[in-house]
Amino acid sequence: MQRQPTFFIPHGGGPCFFMDDPQGTWTGMAQFLRALPATLGEAPLAILIVSGHWETHGGFAFTGRSRPELIFDYSGFPAHTYALRYDAPGAPSLAERAAALVNAAGLSAKVDPQRGLDHGVFVPLKVMWPDAAVPIVEMSIERGLDPSRHLALGRALAPLRDEGVLIIGAGMSFHNMRGYGDPRFTHPSEDFDAWLGETVAMAPAERTARLIEWEGAPAARLSHPREEHLLPLLVAAGAADGPGERVYTERVMQTALSGYRFQ
């Protein structure tokens, strides 16, 4: 079985890919997501995806439902976006295996038998795998937002890559709601994006050291006033033992956004 890479992808804004978009704001991002499965050497047996929209206290959690429901955790969008369907199966055995790996690494993890899939998961996956045939397990981030622990989470889950599991971090490389559409944030977002791309391409040890100290990056707190949308990248990076590369970049709403692949 071929080893799967790991990814950090932008999940867009709410249900953006399933709404009228006369300005083409989300066209490039949707094209990137749609094309991603074809870049894999082998189709994944399952997807383990961490979203910036699920936070848990005192440890990590994995969805354990065999048929996860959708959580429409966005507001103010057209009525049809609350009737979207994504009927992908869950993978309870993968959730148990992942939780066991994380606990064995000295972290804390559990399986949540009730949790569904939030929009940071089902919206991009509906673009990427529209047939909903690949089993999905979502994992949480930890509310303490400790970068070291999220890198360690990725390291603990790395063996799953050799078992046909594709690990994806879904967030946004720039996530300041006040900054979207504001030209004053264009250059700061580009400065942070440049630092992030340089960091991702480093060898794992150096990359890890820089990501732990990410707050010292140029325009870090302007780009992420709160880092819940950045931490999924750290999970994807932690699960990788080779350098990463930027595989998507675009200026969206006057801010720089990127996606990354790790070997």
Image (tube, grey):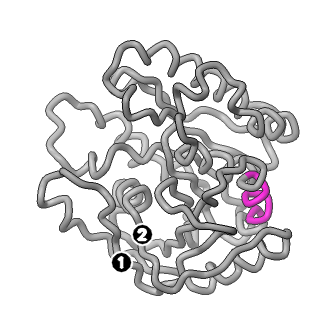
Residue at 79 percent across and 57 percent down: it is 152
Residue 100, position as x, y percentages in the image = 76, 80
Task: Identify the mark at residue 221; answer none if there is no mark.
Answer: none
Crowding at mark 1 (Cα within 10 Å: few <14, some 14-19, many 20+): some
Q: Position of residue 241 (x, y in %)?
A: 81, 49
- State the residue at coordinates (29%, 56%): 74
Q: Is residue 152 magenta?
A: yes
Please determine whether, in this image, residue 57 is positioned above or below residue 244. below
Q: Report the magenta stretch's main SS.
A: helix
What's the amino acid at mark 1?
A: Glu
Q: Nearer the viewer, residue 36 or 119?
A: 119
Q: CA distance from mark 2 to mark 1?
A: 6 Å
At mark 1, the secondary structure is: loop
Q: Say what amino acid the circle numbered 2 marks.
A: Leu
Q: Is residue 160 left or right of residue 115?
A: right
Q: Which corner quadrant of the image does residue 110 belong to?
A: bottom right
Residue interval drawn in magenta: 151-158
Q: Position of residue 46 (x, y in %)?
A: 56, 71
Residue receiving disc 2: 117
Res 177 → quadrant = top left
Left of 65 or right of it: where is 31? left
Q: Residues within 10 Å of mark 2 (few under 14, many from 20)?
A: many
Q: Which mark is residue 69?
A: 1
The residue lying at 47 percent from left, 57 percent from top is 53
> Horizontal placement of 200 versus 107: left or right?
left
Mark 2 and mark 1 in contact? Answer it, CB < 8 Å.
Answer: yes
For the point 78% across and 32% down, the residue is: 210
